[in-house]
Image: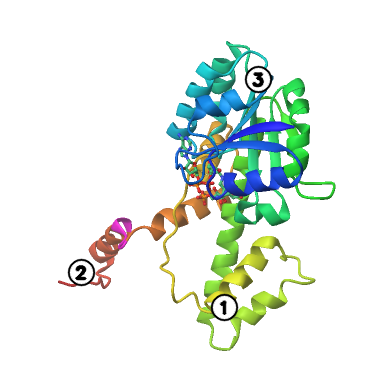
Amino acid sequence: MQIGLIGLGKMGGNMRERIRLAGHTVVGYDRSPDLSDVKDLTELVEQLQAPRIVWVMVPAGAATQSVVDELGGLLEAGDVVVDGGNSRWTDDEKHAAELGAKGIGFVDAGVSGGVWGLQNGYALMVGGDKEHVERLQPIFEALKPEGPYGYVHAGKVGAGHFSKMVHNGIEYAMMQAYAEGWELLEKVDSVENVREVYRSWQDGTVIRSWLLDLAVNALDEDEHLDKLRGWAQDSGEGRWTVEAAVDHAVPLPAITASLFARFASRQDDSPQMKMIAALRNQFGGHAVESTKE
Ligand SMILES: NC(=O)c1ccc[n+]([C@@H]2O[C@H](COP(=O)([O-])OP(=O)(O)OC[C@H]3O[C@@H](n4cnc5c(N)ncnc54)[C@H](O)[C@@H]3O)[C@@H](O)[C@H]2O)c1
Ligand SMILES: O=C(O)[C@H](O)[C@@H](O)[C@H](O)[C@H](O)COP(=O)(O)O
């Protein structure tokens, strides 16, 4: 089978290799010429036989929108576009409608597995019409992990990215729980080897998981994480999960708190805690600390 793949960074680069290893032909395009097989999207489309499949693996938002717009002008009826980036699920219906007006199919695929995907396979959460999803099966088979799980056709257009978004919300809360437990263990003098406690949990415990394995990897590289600043970015999925929860009045205390913990990590000082300190001082004369000159 032939496929065009746009975006050959940390994800797309390895996905190209995994699809090729499964015996398919991949024509890759990246705006960075060092990574690209072709000079532009026109050449990518020309090199594929109709009906074409083109997988988009670029940053969500403006980059994905511009690629989808350009593809809309280059592809023809019968072709299918797959968005494998971490796009907001509400973008999918728009993209499906824009492309659908030209007879071009659209499938959204939430992809999980990060930089380990080449080796372990990529878990796929797919949304779209059955006929389009079925056409993509050989590519999904090439990308997914071996074994019975790691792939789902979750529902209509948008269902793949919505499922991936919830997956990432869970990822936030799980990481936060491992992080909080680690900080508490590090604080207590009687626990002399926190890393070995974490390592021991990898087998037999209720909380064993791949994230726990990765936490042990990180502690093996830097036992007390001394080389890192306590600063964490977020790229949207956590926020969208919380927004969806508000829309549907679903309580998500753990996921919401883990998102807010990341915001707090990016502050050098806490303006709201200044207000707490000021109020405690106002009503109770409690001690405050001054900023250092
Ligand atoms: N890194 C992960 O763990 C991970 C996991 C699952 C999904 N994703 C999602 O996959 C997508 C790609 O992530 P990544 O980690 O590979 O990012 P990346 O920054 O490593 O790679 C993105 C690539 O897209 C290229 N690009 C950007 N705009 C382009 C355009 N208009 N035309 C052609 N190429 C363009 C860049 O040059 C770059 O090589 C994102 O939507 C991301 O959220 C990432
Ligand atoms: O399942 C995965 O492979 C990851 O969730 C992946 O999608 C990525 O690493 C996130 O985009 C990070 O998201 P934040 O930047 O929001 O932490």
- Which numbered dot is residue 159? none
Q: Is residue 279 left or right of residue 248?
A: left
Q: Which residue is mark 3?
A: 79
Going by the numbered disc 2, the residue's amino acid type is Thr
- Location of the C terminus (image quadrant): bottom left
Residue nearest the viewer, comparing 253 with 54? 54
Residue beneath the point at 40% across and 60% down: 265
Q: Please tell me whether mark 2 sits on a helix, a strand or a loop.
A: loop
Going by the numbered disc 1, the residue's amino acid type is Leu
Q: Which residue is mark 2?
A: 291
**Tag 2 near tag 3, CB within 8 Å:** no
Does residue 134 show up magenta in the picture?
A: no
Does residue 271 show up magenta in the picture?
A: yes
Q: Residues within 10 Å of mark 3 (few under 14, many from 20)?
A: some
Q: Earlier in the sequence, mark 1 or mark 3?
A: 3
Q: Earlier in the sequence, mark 1 or mark 2?
A: 1
Image spot of residue 258 (x, y percent): 52, 54
The span picked out in magenta is 268-272
Q: Which residue is mark 1?
A: 185
- Disc 2 from disc 3: Cα separation: 61 Å
Q: Residues within 10 Å of mark 1 (few under 14, many from 20)?
A: some
167 shown above or below 98:
below
Q: Magenta segment, principal secondary structure?
A: loop
